[in-house]
Amino acid sequence: MHLQRIWTTQLGEHTGQRVKLAGWLHRLRPLSQVTFLVLRDAQGLAQVVIEEPALAAELAKLPHESVLSVEGLVVAEPQAPRGVEIHSPSIEVLSESAAPPPFDLFRPTLTGQLPTILDHAPLTLRHPRQRAIFRLSSATMEGFRAALRSQDFVEIQTPKIVASATEGGANVFKLDYFGGPAYLAQSPQFYKQTMVGIFERVFEVGPVFRAEPHDTTRHINEYVSLDAEMGFIEDHTTVMRLLNGVLAGMVATLAETEPEALALLKLKLPQVPETIPQIHFTEAQELILRETGEDARREPDLAPAHERFLGEWARRTYNSDFLFVVGYPMVKRPFYTHPDPTRPGYSRGFDLLFRGLELVTGGQRLHRYEDYLTALARRDLEVAPFETYLEAFKYGMPPHGGFAIGLERWLARLLEAPNIRETTLFPRDLNRLAP
Amino acid sequence: MHLQRIWTTQLGEHTGQRVKLAGWLHRLRPLSQVTFLVLRDAQGLAQVVIEEPALAAELAKLPHESVLSVEGLVVAEPQAPRGVEIHSPSIEVLSESAAPPPFDLFRPTLTGQLPTILDHAPLTLRHPRQRAIFRLSSATMEGFRAALRSQDFVEIQTPKIVASATEGGANVFKLDYFGGPAYLAQSPQFYKQTMVGIFERVFEVGPVFRAEPHDTTRHINEYVSLDAEMGFIEDHTTVMRLLNGVLAGMVATLAETEPEALALLKLKLPQVPETIPQIHFTEAQELILRETGEDARREPDLAPAHERFLGEWARRTYNSDFLFVVGYPMVKRPFYTHPDPTRPGYSRGFDLLFRGLELVTGGQRLHRYEDYLTALARRDLEVAPFETYLEAFKYGMPPHGGFAIGLERWLARLLEAPNIRETTLFPRDLNRLAP
């Protein structure tokens, strides 16, 4: 009889039947009377009971991580993981590991310094805890897209090779494009705004590149940005409501699709409030002065310590992991930011803090052609490099705005991981280009 | 009363009611007694009847593409598009176009040379036909992902900045990475194979970069690749079955979610056969000799003209738009290609032709560490640049394979567009870096 392979997580549905599993030799535990083989597949683990001494001896010769196919009888066993185990197995070696792996993937957590763990990502990502993180990454992207598609957003993929380093000055990677200069896009900002003229509502999930020479636990040089942009908004609050719903959708998708990964990571998902609380930038500064004694009222931005303080304050005051800070000073926001008409100098831009860390930046953008010309002139920027971008505004653009969520940063805060590299699949930083 | 804005495509559900629309001034047609305003939003068009001469005069002063909000009464009118039009409108100008657009977006097709149309993409993409193409792009990505997620595939996002130009020799973009060299990834090949060790089944939708100095209608230098990779396969036929199902899923999603775009483009979707017909590379060569008199049996690859011939042959013989060509010679396939054990010199690699053009490349890969060392040595390649890649195979990897579909090429063949730039949102080629 030719058996169809099943996942280890499906064993419970097959008690009393012979089944076929396949996966990696995760662990081998020889006891006095019996040997336990733990097999790992993409979904989970299964315990296989080896009673035949010859087979046990054979398996003992294989390095961990060898790839096996196992046929056997599913037997209920309350002591075993998921309450079932495999008896009377016949085992085929599909691919033998060429060497014993330098990490014990079967221990509850990986031991080793982070750089070493990252150096060996092809192996260390196989650890059930590590890979659970990137199942959450996959589900986050899916939840983000589903939330937006349900509101008629259209997915776009925009170029990563761009003609000019227009958006953020020096922090841009330069490349050789058939003998001429080109740059890696720091964000899809200009393109997603342009696409508002076509689809009104667009989103993109893709890589962005920042040549920031900072070696911190919060920065990487290539990351995945979850971008959305929307036309016909009232003001930045329309965008904030959209983001509020998208976050709720992301969390709901994680809860629905990844219960096992969440359980393995002992992760409690945050509650996304019906309406995320907000505070104006200037009020935040007053609050910081009043409660911490530190006067940051001359600063055009929030220091990381003050973001942490506000995160704690939001938790205390609103029982919320999330807090909008709105109305950042225009001087610290990009030229396309829409000012607050009622408070000159302040913007219709916002940050969303998640557990005291900036997770999302967003806001309303300028939409009138003349306003762009004025904004560029005010910053002493030439018009020429922006010409094709400006064409979008020249021919009629509605009030619009959007936001960008950093995928790896979202995961880092969700897991309360001290270093963003722990939630980046193959991180790129000042010193790391491989694997 | 504050009206909620609705889409133009929802008008039919509101006959006899006052509604609010918003969008672009797509066209203004003054007749002797009445003026017709055609309003375009993200979903479609609506006809607004202007009977008030003052209002008509006001509108006549606005350039096309100005952004309007329109409130009015929905009236059934069999002559109007969708059988409804707006009467007694009150109109607010949200944003005036700064100049009359240099293209008539209301004509059935855009007139102009392709380079000019591409130069003005922020405007020309607003044409209903143009944007319909990119709605199909969005739906294709969604269909691709849905088909794979339903089979337990996990989504990954892998780095686009890589340490070495390992995959395809010269055709790689080089960049300055903090003073040292780095390259843009030509594909996620090495990463998706590595991730088979972690999730068994993975997919990625993202940009790939090819520094090919070819100026053809089939090549662009940055495109979107729909990549999948799967472990525990029997051989390349498992991958072909997977791809067959994924294509069916993509076509089904297009049919379900984009009927309006398909109708606008007068596009008949291809039928994906239950089992796509296949032919071995050597049989294809014999067939070409027999039917065309051209002897290509010494060639290690198929010429474009021969691919076209095979496409016509598959249509005639199997009534299929799709044809698998399997068993390409090893010499033309990358080093990680799995050979056919029964036919030395030939591979377990395949191409999928769609209407006579190569759309997908795929196959089984090597999975044993020693096989990689042998394959690299045979091609005189050093092991060092592949070290982290090889780690995936060193520690046990199952038989696996995968494929990559070029998104823009898929759309080009679907639309039978003569130039791939017509189905690329913002194309990058030898001479084009903007918009």
Image (tube, coloured by chain):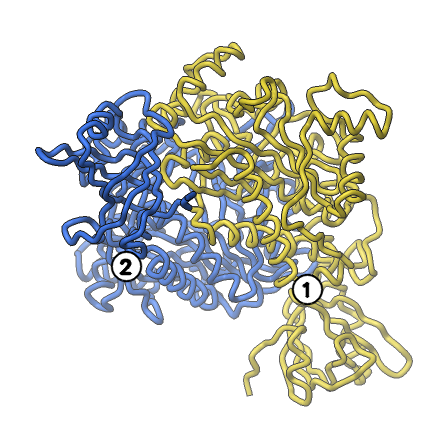
Chain colours: A yellow, B blue
Q: Is residue B123 left or right of residue A201?
A: left
Mark 2 nearby-residue class (10 Å; few <14, some 14–19, many ≥20): few
**Front in this rendered view, residue A282 or A40:** A282
Residue A400 image position (x, y, % from top left): 46, 33
**Front in this rendered view, residue A260 or B5:** B5
Q: Quadrant of residue B268?
A: bottom left
**Front in this rendered view, residue A406 or B287:** A406
**In the picture shown, does residue B425 fall above or below B276?**
above
Tell me if label 1 and label 2 are in contact, CB under 8 Å. Answer: no
Q: Quadrant of residue B101?
A: top left
**In the picture shown, does residue B311 fall above or below A415?**
below
Residue A10 image position (x, y, % from top left): 64, 76
Q: Is residue A433 left or right of residue B174?
A: right
Mark 1 nearby-residue class (10 Å; few <14, some 14–19, many ≥20): some
Q: Is any atom of residue B345 visible in this view? A: no
Q: Quadrant of residue B273?
A: bottom left
Mark in the foreground, 1 or 2: 1
The residue type indicated by label 1 comes to Pro
Tell me the number on the disc at residue A259.
1
The residue type indicated by label 2 comes to Leu
Residue A288 image position (x, y, % from top left): 80, 28
Residue at (46%, 12%) from the top-left corner? Answer: A382
Q: Is any atom of residue A359 visible in this view? A: yes
Q: Chain of mark 1?
A: A
- Residue linked to disc 2: B269
Residue extending furthest toward the bottom: A16
- Tell me, yes or no, whether dots 1 and 2 are on the same chain: no
